[in-house]
Image (tube, coloured by chain):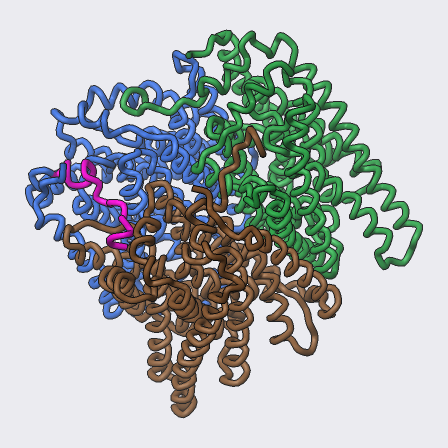
Chain colours: A brown, B green, C blue
């Protein structure tokens, strides 16, 4: 059955994209006295920058392609939001963080790309519940909110820039959950979602492909913004060990808890990344593998248990429907990692205890701030997106019931 | 129905490959007094070299796998032509460009790999219309022609080597179109091609996978041959911005122009690369992002409009059947980029106006030369390949109607 | 029909994994006084390290996914064994090779990752014949055996560390064949395996995807452990040429020998890697491309001929059933490369003949040692795994007849 959408809404999507694109072009032309960074030392980071590209553009896009009916929309739309969002994030980053001389460097491209990550995580929570116009508006709103949150943490709480970026997982997960809570219509959700949440073997394999690439390049993600070479080295090694342990743990625990003794591929695919998320905060400072391995172990444990017990229950009972389980992949492991960081800072062997106590408090404070900002702004965004303006009568049919990304019948229209 | 091909023709394919392979081996043994470059500074380029490998071997191979029936042949044959062509290109490059001391370096491997690109682009135009022997002969002929064209431009028109390489897109597209014009048999094309040009969801996803990897690594392609670090940096940043803008533009324009308001995945997949093609010429010299973004915008616009309006019409009306639409992905954006380069050179802030006027004229001259060489040699090649020698009575059945790359029934023959 | 496995066996798998994981954590905590390497020069190797990651984790996992029914188990289990095995290998490597100061560096992570390779190769031989508990035990046993073999070669036969690692292909292939010989039950093998060894187009494409990534990153594999930059350069160039020639040769020869003139995709996919395996031993020392090309040519020839003639015959006649043909992909090309290395060492132009004769004998000795260790320990391992302890009455049904990795029905349990 063809969707009976308001034609005006679908018509507005390309105009919105074009409008934003031309605005971005003029911002780069007039407002930013930008030229490229004069130094060339950042070129050394280029291989790591490409790893981040692969992780975010390819890895995330294909990882969320596991739903048979939304595969194409997941990949195509994810790609477009990255292409759109990184321009927006580079502009915001340049305005907020470089107030004296505005230059574009590989670091600012990297920061821009990584600032799109919370949007992609939020997408995972609302996938299948929003139309493309709503998704675009959500991306346009979430990127400045996340950048503002990072700005507050870096300037007023004086944490390092790369630590600010590591809050992306928490921010994206809780922002997405808040939006999802307001967007979901309770009457339909139980019936409709079961039908929608089917996967097939091919889509699962593509999803695994994306997840494996994310797993492999996560050490680059946790280390790319670090300038100090010892910290960068620590971040690479610790992330690698935490990922390995969390993958093995998720596999074991998920298998152990399944009543039929069978493994859910989706648990492994999702949970194996939990170690990388949790170690993000403290990876740069740990000198020994065993602490990273312990964090990876508990992150895998948390993720596997919550994916098994909570997701099904919560999706059925509560109204906060979480399509891809981002709360258990990014939200909880992120919180765990943040708390672990604060504990580790206290026990670290530095000279002055006062400063460390302060750092631990700041660490907890940053997490609470990020939680507050993401939840409140997510609710506001969800409320905004629920307005009539963005919601056609048949919004549910718009994007998914009739595939928006139809397959080209090349013979007739290629 | 099994194909009733001349058995002699199919038999000749492996002999041709073996013959060429042994010839190549002896050329390396006797004629080239080659040893590897004594310096090791090129090792620094290794990560970028690997990006080019991924782009050309994996990206191109899988991008052209979108036709359900030709997926296997596309991937397998593309791979073999790269393995064959890069040896051939390294030999030609060593003979033409290194007349005094013949050494092999990472740069010459890179140049060899990139010289295979026009062959792959031409394949996109003739896919499904030629048998493997014809494809092999086309590759064997096109690589020396492209290298000769590069040689003339570099030696007699004195342009930089990396600029010469950027003409690969134009050369490949127009060479392929010329060959396609002569190879297509008008009576069959309309009926047969419709049947052949079907895609399925899985083949489209593999194609998207290849295209996304090409998109991500295009900055490496545009910068790998540059030695100067400032130019390399410029090339990376500019290509990145141009690609992002062209992806957003193609999406918007393609959606806008579709009468049913639906998006063709193939347009996004193809058009998103247009920005990278167009910025190739001038990426090394632009100091500001907005010019690169403008070029990306117009490249996306050109590609989306021509894919929507022209491809279907031209494929139906004219005899120049262009299977993958390479004219709109590589041909037109390449021309646009070449003209933009010439305009930008004039307006650039250098010391001497005379030299710049000369450079602009040389830029236009190079494009005209490349167009002329590719069109004329394409026609000659097409004529040659149409000879009885390469054309068995049932050539159409040879490659595609009965899959040439049959799937191994492992139980019986693995 | 649901499998009638002993529930105790399936139940033991997650406990085994958890048990090993916690043991590893405590080894890192108590026994190794490990901290990370103080120098940071290894960070330069990071892009190559990521190439190895892609090759082993992604490439191998997906390459062995070509069997339609084992795709998921292949990918998922391969991934888990790497995550498990690299911790085990890093521990063993640290204990055996760094007896004075135990540090973890990028090199030891790399060594750990590469030590998992023989396990993955052995998996290819026994795929579909063992249950997951047996596979886990095999991995736990094979990694220390391979590391011990490397230790003997490096310490007592005084060969370079990277040369020791190159014996991974031989070790993995012959260890796997020995295990397969003891594990296979003759009565069932012919009937059951035919049914099991089917592939489909999608699984073949995923497999080709994995193989192409392995092909592209093989130069990194052969060069990553080399410290000398000239040797590293040689290894990259030689591997690249050998791979190209072996791909073209395998294609030609496989096509030539097929009676119907058709190509088996599986031959190309498998054989094209033979050149990289064979050149591994001597890649670091060859100064000219033609020797590498010749080795690639003969490796391709060997692999294509043996895949065509021997695999089918041997799988039918003998009891050594080799599911993925690892003997022809890794075993024979590895032997060829080892012999070529010994010949080349003799003819090399060094100062002292005595030393060279010694080196050639050592080269042959290392291969014989590796063959002996892998065959004998493989037989012992196979005998051990055949014990009642690991073999439930219906072991064949356990893993494959009823897919162990079931697809998540997201609606009910995601």
| Residue C286 seen | no
The foreground one among B356 and A371 is A371
Quarter of the image for residue B159 reads top right
Residue sitting at x 59%, y 47%: B255
Residue A390 in the image, given as x and y percentages of width and height? 52, 62
Residue that lies at the very extreme toward the right in this rendered image: B354
Residue sitting at x 36%, y 80%: A342
Q: Is residue B186 found left or right of A237 in the rendered image?
A: right
Quarter of the image for residue B177 reads top right
The foreground one among B254 and B217 is B254
**Start-end of magenta stretch:** C395-414
Residue sitting at x 24%, y 54%: C413
User: What quarter of the picture does the N terminus of chain C occupy?
Assistant: top left
The foreground one among A123 and A128 is A128
Q: How many labels does the image show?
A: 0
| Residue B284 seen | yes
The foreground one among A330 and A105 is A330
Q: In this view, does A340 lie above or below B211?
A: below
Q: Is residue A257 found left or right of A285 in the rendered image?
A: left
Q: Is residue B203 above or below residue C114?
A: above
Membership of A400 in magenta stretch: no
């Amino acid at each position: 059955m063809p969707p009976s959408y308001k034609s005006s809404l679908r018509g507005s999507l390309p105009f919105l994209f074009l409008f934003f694109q031309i605005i971005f072009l003029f911002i780069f032309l007039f407002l930013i006295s930008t030229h490229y960074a004069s130094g060339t030392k950042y070129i050394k980071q280029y291989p790591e920058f490409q790893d981040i590209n692969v992780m975010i553009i390819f890895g995330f896009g294909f990882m969320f392609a596991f739903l048979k009916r939304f595969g194409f929309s997941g990949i195509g739309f994810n790609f477009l939001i990255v292409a759109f969002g990184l321009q927006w994030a580079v502009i915001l980053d340049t305005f907020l963080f470089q107030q004296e001389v505005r230059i574009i460097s590989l670091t600012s491209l990297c920061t821009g790309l990584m600032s799109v990550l919370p949007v992609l995580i939020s997408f995972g929570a609302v996938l299948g519940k929003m139309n493309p116009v709503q998704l675009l508006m959500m991306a346009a709103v979430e990127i400045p909110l996340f950048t503002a949150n990072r700005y507050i943490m870096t300037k007023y709480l004086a944490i390092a820039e790369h630590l600010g970026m590591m809050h992306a997982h928490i921010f994206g997960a809780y922002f997405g959950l808040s939006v999802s809570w307001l967007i979901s219509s309770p009457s339909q959700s139980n019936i409709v979602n079961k039908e929608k949440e089917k996967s097939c073997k091919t889509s699962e394999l593509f999803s695994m492909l994306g997840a494996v690439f994310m797993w492999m390049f996560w050490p680059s993600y946790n280390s790319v913004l670090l300038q100090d070479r010892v910290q960068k080295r620590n971040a690479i090694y610790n992330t690698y060990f935490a990922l390995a342990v969390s993958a093995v743990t998720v596999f074991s625990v998920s298998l152990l808890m399944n009543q039929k003794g069978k493994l859910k591929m989706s648990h492994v695919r999702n949970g194996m990344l939990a170690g990388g998320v949790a170690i993000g905060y403290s990876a740069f400072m740990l000198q020994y593998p065993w602490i990273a391995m312990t964090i990876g172990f508990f992150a895998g444990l948390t993720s596997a248990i919550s994916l098994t017990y909570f997701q099904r229950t919560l999706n059925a009972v509560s109204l906060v429907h979480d399509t891809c389980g981002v709360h258990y992949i990014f939200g909880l492991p992120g919180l765990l990692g943040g708390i672990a960081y604060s504990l580790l800072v206290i026990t670290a062997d530095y000279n002055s205890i006062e400063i460390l106590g302060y750092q631990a408090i700041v660490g907890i404070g940053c997490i609470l701030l990020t939680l507050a900002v993401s939840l409140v702004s997510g609710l506001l965004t969800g409320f905004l997106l629920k307005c009539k303006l963005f919601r056609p009568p048949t919004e549910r049919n718009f994007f998914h019931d009739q595939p928006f990304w139809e397959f080209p019948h090349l013979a007739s229209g290629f």
